[in-house]
Amino acid sequence: MGWGKVWLRIVLLLVLASIAFITKGYWNATRDPIIRTATIAVADWPANTPPLRVLHLSDVHVAGPDMPPRRLRTIVRQLNALKPDLIVIAGDLISEAGMFAQVYPAAEVVAPLGGLRAPLGVIVAPGNHDHWFDAKALSAELKKNGITVLQNEAVRRGPLIIGGVDDDFSGHADVPATFAAMAALGVGPRVILTHSPDSAPDLPSPVAAVFAGHTHCGQLVFPLIGALSSVSRYGNRFACGLIRDGQQWVVVGAGLGTSILPLRYGAPPDVWMVTLSGGR
């Protein structure tokens, strides 16, 4: 066999391997999200108050081809069937740019999220992509759909005082302002909703839970190599999942959508159903 035929076969094998890699990665990215569960015992949980089921989403990244609004509408129906008490979304509703991304207007991005249902409502803290796109436009659409937006602010929902720290990665976080807003709401178990988990070490006092995203749990994670990139200044400290950090828990979701490449390996889409309750 001549060298020309050998090289041709090598090139064909590389092309086939690339197609297989992209196809499998895209399938991984567009599968239904895994529903992960956790129970967190809260020391100052009010007596005679039933547990609270908090559904935690992050990194929705509405954009084509992998997360068009129609796919998000399907996911919303699946999540409503879980019957959470409260839904929190840790930012990055949109992908505003990218070689492979079809960008949608704010109204189309938010409309499917307007279908989320929970007795205590839906709360969003913005992410870096939301700011890079148009945080004001997204916020306006969220409020039209009955969704609360927290940007260094706080609200009370049931027994919880929820502080929403704006995005740390894009320089919008103001932890002191958030804690001042929480203090103004009186006493009660406290949680923080924020896009980047890097805000967790900046908190002046521990909270029951920090709900975050941003890392995508690596998005592309391979055996022996690990994640191809880290978007946290703390490395792997807040890489993924349920993390005990001092006296508080940090919940970092893998997210629903993707960023830069519409592919996932070793980090499937997920959401977290976290039950907060009294006891230890």
Image: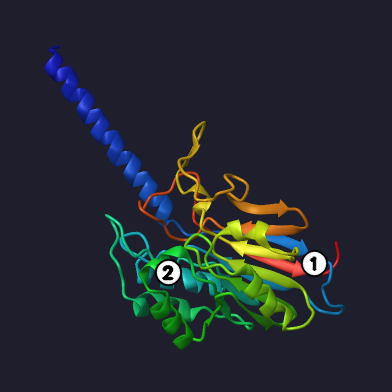
The residue lying toward the viewer, choosing from 48 and 136, is 136
Q: Does dot 1 land on a helix, a strand or a loop?
A: loop
Please tell me which residue lies in front, 278 or 124: 124
Which quarter of the rendering shows the N terminus? top left
Residue 59, relative to residue 161: is it above or below?
above
Kindly identify which numbered label has been placed on residue 130. Answer: 2
The residue at the point 48 percent across, 72 percent down is: 76
Indicate left or right for 269 with 22 as reference.
right
User: Which quadrant of the figure has residue 176?
Assistant: bottom right
Q: Which residue is mark 1?
A: 42
- Give the crowd class for mark 1: few <14, some 14-19, many >=20 residues within 10 Å: some
Residue type highlighted by circle 2: Asp
Residue 159 visible in image = yes
- Position of the C terminus, as image quadrant, is bottom right
Indicate the position of residue 245 as horizontal and vertical percent values.
72, 53
* Spatial CA span between label 2 and label 1: 31 Å
Check disc 1 and give the amino acid type: Val
SS state under label 2: helix
Crowd tier of the residue under label 2, counting other residues whose Cα lies within 10 Å: few below 14, some 14–19, many 20 or above: many
Q: Quadrant of residue 165?
A: bottom right
Q: In the figure, is residue 85 to the left or right of 188? A: left
